[in-house]
């Protein structure tokens, strides 16, 4: 089941939350900063040992002080007009995050709207990619949360969910 929720992702009681990280994995602004503050300094120490992460890929860490057991750090692309493989790289973020979640037996997972803040990816285009890939993995999870920060994002995601029906019997 995919659920749209308006919340601060750091407060969610799920198996894993996804972070919109940057290539350094050492923290930044937006949701990344919020997650590092809430998880505590041990997260930065742990991330230092990972040696960064390329755009489109993801890395998993413990949740430290969060309620979530895991944090999956996905590095989204910066929007540069759409002709620099942004859509492929953003889709890879979601797919690679889901792959790590499956490997670690995650059943409930929450995603922020990756790349749509400081990285300026158009929200409707990013949302379409997010929902399409969430649909692909829906049957493998008991709950996938699209965690929106603003009421406008909630509206956008809910509209997009309605126009993208669940794929019955799909299996990945
Ligand atoms: P990026 O650099 O990938 O664009 P940002 O953190 O700037 O990442 O923004 C990604 C999305 O996360 C934006 O839609 C922003 O509104 C949202 N966001 C920011 N803080 C939080 C939070 N605490 N919980 C959930 N979403 C958040």
Image (cartoon, rainbow, N blue to C red):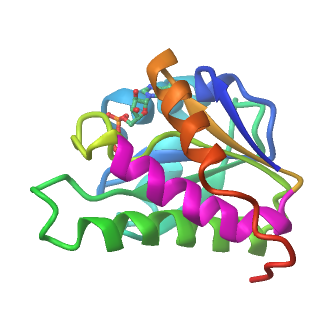
120 with respect to 146 (left or right): left
Residue 13 vs 87, above or below: the answer is above
Q: Residue furthest front?
A: 163
Which residue sits at x=45%, y=20%?
Answer: 152
The image position of residue 69, as x and y in percent, is 78, 45
Q: Is residue 117 left or right of residue 83?
A: right
- Residue at the location (81% across, 31% down)? 13
Q: Is residue 30 magenta?
A: no
Residue 50 against residue 142 in the figure, above or below = below
Question: Of all residues shown, which one is farthest toward the top?
Answer: 151
Q: How far from the left and from the top, in percent, is residue 90?
A: 38, 63
- Give the residue displayed 34% in from the left and 40% down from the top: 123
**Ligand number 1: quarter of image:** top left
Residue 149 makes an appearance in the image: yes
On the question of residue 26 being in view, the answer is no
> Closer to the camera, 41 or 29?
29
**Residue at x-position 46% and y-position 65%:** 93
Residue range in magenta is 124-141
Residue 116 appears left or right of 92: left
Answer with the quarter of the image where residue 116 lies. top left
Main secondary structure type of the part rendered in magenta: helix
Where residue 118 sits: x, y (%)? 24, 35
* Image coords of residue 21 (percent x, y): 39, 48
Q: Residue furthest bottom?
A: 172
Res. 95 image quadrant: bottom right
Q: Is residue 37 above or below residue 42?
A: above
Q: Nearer the viewer, residue 44 or 5?
A: 5
Q: Report the number of numbered marks.
A: 0
Which part of the image, by quadrant, shows the C terminus?
bottom right
**Could you say which is closer to the camera, residue 11 or residue 138?**
138
């Amino acid at each position: 089941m995919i659920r749209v929720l308006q919340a601060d992702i750091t407060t969610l009681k799920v198996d894993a939350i996804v972070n919109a990280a940057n290539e350094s994995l050492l923290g930044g602004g937006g949701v990344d900063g919020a997650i590092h503050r809430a998880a505590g300094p041990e997260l930065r120490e742990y991330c230092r040992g990972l040696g960064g992460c390329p755009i489109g890929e993801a890395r998993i860490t413990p949740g430290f002080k969060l309620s979530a057991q895991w944090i999956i750090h996905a590095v989204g692309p910066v929007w540069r007009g759409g002709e620099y493989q942004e859509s492929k790289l953003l889709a890879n973020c979601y797919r690679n995050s889901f792959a790590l979640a499956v490997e670690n037996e995650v059943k409930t997972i929450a995603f922020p709207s990756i790349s749509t803040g400081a990285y300026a990816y158009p929200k409707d285009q990013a949302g379409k990619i997010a929902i399409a890939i969430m649909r692909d993995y829906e049957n493998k999870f008991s709950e996938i949360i699209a965690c929106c920060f603003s009421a406008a994002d909630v509206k956008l995601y809910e509209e997009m969910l309605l126009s993208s029906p669940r794929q019955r019997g799909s299996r990945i």
